[in-house]
Image (spheres, rainbow, N blue to C red):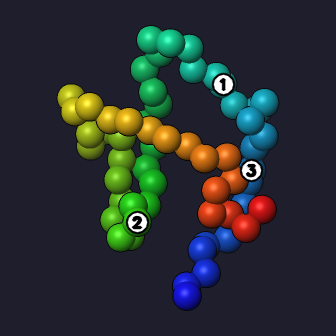
Amino acid sequence: MQQPPTVTRTKLGTDTPTLKVGDRAPDFTVKSHDGRDISLAGLRGKRVVLAFFHFAFTNT
């Protein structure tokens, strides 16, 4: 079984701005489950659901 990549946190959640309802999400790029880069900008105009799991798959 392949080990997940090591993640180094550079900021705490309290150091980053919090979005409010109606705020536009900032652009970001993540790796998909099959290794492709997915950017939010590339999905503009489409419906997108983001689900973040605190510390999921980070061996923390």
Question: Where is residue 45 drawn, in percent x and y?
Answer: 21, 29
Q: Please indicate, yes or no, whether residue 44 appears anywhere in the rendered image.
A: no
3 horizontally vs 22: left or right: right
The answer to which of 31 and 51 lies nearer the viewer is: 51
For residue 33, which numbered disc appears in the image? Answer: 2
Distance (Cα) linking label 3 and label 2:
23 Å
Residue count near mark 1 (Cα–Cα under 10 Å), binned few <14, some 14–19, many ≥20: few
Residue 25 appears left or right of 41: right
In this rendering, position of residue 26 left or right of residue 6: left
Residue at 75%, 43% (x, y): give it.
Answer: 11
Image quadrant of residue 44?
top left
SS at mark 2 in the image: loop
Q: Residue 15 falls in which quadrant of the image?
A: top right
Estimate how packed mark 3 is, as few (under 14), some (14 to 19) or many (20 or more) residues with alpha carbons within 10 Å.
few
- In the structure shown, which secondary structural element does the residue marked by tag 1 occupy? loop
Q: Nearer the viewer, mark 2 or mark 1?
A: 2
**Do the residues under discs 1 and 3 have CB atoms within 8 angstroms?**
no
Q: Amino acid at mark 1?
A: Pro
Residue drawn at 55 percent across, 88 percent down: 1
Most distant residue in the left direction: 45
Q: Is residue 54 above or below residue 6?
A: above
Q: Which residue is mark 3?
A: 10
> Residue beneath label 1, please?
17
Residue 38, disc:
none
Callout 2 crowding tier (Cα within 10 Å): few <14, some 14–19, many ≥20: few
Question: Residue drawn 50% across and 12% down?
Answer: 21
Does the image show residue 50? Answer: yes
State which tag comes first along the sequence, 1 or 3: 3
Height in image: 23 above or below 50? above
| SS type, badge 3 | loop
Q: Amino acid at mark 3?
A: Thr
